[in-house]
Image (cartoon, rainbow, N blue to C red):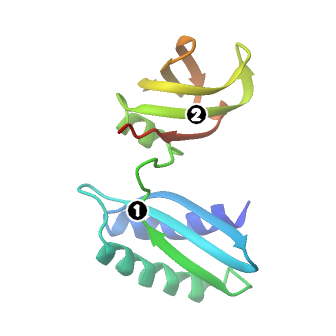
Amino acid sequence: MTKAVEIENLIESITIKENYELVDVQYVKENGDWIVRIFIDKDGGVTMSDCEKISLLFGAVLDERDILKDSYVLEVSSPGLNRVLKKEESFKRFIGAKIRLQTFEAINNQKNFLGKLLDFKDGIVKIEDAANGIVEIKFLDIKKANVETEF
């Protein structure tokens, strides 16, 4: 289990209790510093006040549980315009949106897909890919996916 998954498992119940969605957790080393990045969302969007509140809660839990042996910087923010899609619920929520996704293995000689998310049912993502039309992809075959914001 990676540290990011361990952190996610530790804080997910707090997120739900506080009526937020835990979108993503990253634990990375940048410029010699360990950084815990936590992305949250809620109906109506996330404010700076929300991020501050959750940061205090998560920071206390991480320090109390002492699962991070190195010092770290905690960052809590909204998922942004091109939010990551990691959970089945997120795919269901963004049906109709334009998404970009990458698979672990090629499907019809293609690993990268861009198009409208048509459906998510029974562990299958259905996307209308700009290059190859309607493609069905198993959720477990997705390496990464995100909403593609159009301007």
Q: Element at badge 2?
A: strand
Instruction: Give the residue drawn at x 58%, y 33%.
Output: 101
Pick whichever, 120 or 148, lies toward us. 148
Quadrant in the picture for residue 36 = bottom right
Residue 48 image label: none
Mark 1 residue element: loop
Inspect this view and state whether residue 52 appears: yes
Determine which of the numbered discs, if any, sits on residue 78 in the image.
Answer: 1
> Residue 112, relative to residue 75: is it above or below?
above
Q: How many marks?
A: 2
Asked where in the image residue 103 lies, by quadrant, the reply is top right
Q: Say what amino acid the circle numbered 1 marks.
A: Ser
The answer to whether 138 is drawn above or below residue 108 in the figure is below
User: Which residue ends up furthest to the front in the rendered image?
Assistant: 151
Q: Which residue is drawn at 74% across and 85% down?
A: 69
Position of residue 28 measured from the top left corner of the image (x, y, whole percent): 69, 68
Q: Residues within 10 Å of mark 2 (few under 14, many from 20)?
A: many
- Judge left or right: residue 79 versus residue 63: left
Q: Do the residues labelled 2 and 1 touch (CB within 8 Å)?
A: no
Q: Which residue is drawn at 37% across and 30% down?
A: 95
Which of the 4 quarters of the picture holds residue 86?
top right
Residue under numbered circle 2: 101
Give x and y (percent) for residue 34: 69, 77
Q: As drawn, is 101 to the left or to the right of 141? A: left
Q: At label 2, which amino acid type do we have?
A: Leu
- Side of 58 relative to 151 (left or right): right
Badge 1 crowding class, 10 Å Cα cut-off, few under 14, some 14 to 19, many 20 or more, is: many
